[in-house]
Image: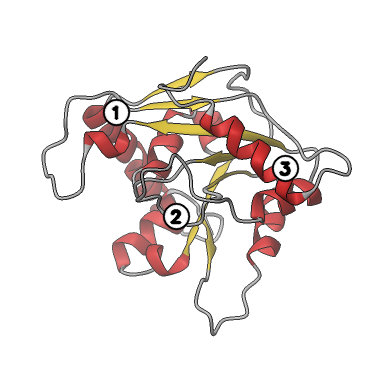
Amino acid sequence: MTDLASLPRRIAARAVGHGLAFVARFITAVRADWRGIEPVAKQRVYFANHVSNGDMPMIWTVLPGHMRRQTRPVAAADYWLKNKIRAFVGPEVFNCVLIDRRPEVDDKPLDKIIEALDEGSSLIIFPEGNRNMTDDPLLPFKSGLYNMGKARPHVDLVPTWVANLNEIMPKGEIIPLPLICTVTFGAPIHVEEDESKDDFLKRAADALVDLRPEAPQ
């Protein structure tokens, strides 16, 4: 999408991206915590917990610039194409891989994801599929993370925990609380030979939950 955009739009998209990152840092003082992994330019799929629409921008913000430019969030087309502003920010600022969730559309999300990986992009995904509004740390994972791990086993699958974002801006509040948002990146995992889908998804969920600040270290 970015390659097809005009030069002024690409310049505007980059400026808006810097602006959004500045706002995110100003409001939440978001910081990255790299554990067992280094912030280097290697192709990865960052799979994260999902409690807020702000999760993806926080992860995107804390990535170093050279990694951010190669990393594309996987996101719902119905959300990011809902109006002109979102249709600019999602596809052109974040360079999202947009998935059409309408039941009447014969869309194949995994095909778009694999295409993006084969183009060399890293990805940000939320394997729960929806925002977690429960007291449980995670909702059950969808099968997409397993399928992409099987299809492209060389790509690192990186557990990524976004902490405090729902406490900083609880539902219904308009003034953020003075808490720091932390994005913790854990050691990469891969689908092991002969590992079942259920076993892998449990292992992936466990690796993600282990990154919670309140989890035993």
Q: Is residue 9 above or below residue 58?
A: below
Label 3 or label 2, whichever comes before in sequence order:
2
Q: Position of residue 25 (x, y in %)?
A: 29, 28
Identify the image's colour scheme: rainbow, by chain, secondary structure or one colour. secondary structure
Residue at label 3?
200
Tell which residue pokes out farthest to the bottom in this image.
104
Residue at the location (51% across, 56% down)? 129
As helix, strand or loop, the secondary structure at mark 1 comes to helix
Q: CA distance from mark 1 to mark 3?
A: 34 Å
| Foreground of the two, 134 or 80 | 134
Q: From the viewer's perspective, is the residue at label 1 or at label 2 nearer?
A: 1
Which three-letter amino acid code belongs to the residue tagged 3? Phe
Q: From the viewer's perspective, is the residue at label 1 or at label 3 nearer?
A: 3
As helix, strand or loop, the secondary structure at mark 3 comes to helix
| Foreground of the two, 42 or 141 | 141
As helix, strand or loop, the secondary structure at mark 2 comes to helix
Residue at the location (34% across, 35% down)? 21
Q: CA distance from mark 3 to mark 2?
A: 33 Å
Residue at label 2?
92
Residue at the location (62% across, 74% down)? 107
131 sits left or right of 95 in the view: left
Q: Residues within 10 Å of mark 1 (few under 14, many from 20)?
A: some
Q: From the viewer's perspective, is the residue at label 3 or at label 2 nearer?
A: 3
Residue at label 1?
25
**Quadrant for the N terminus in the image:** bottom right
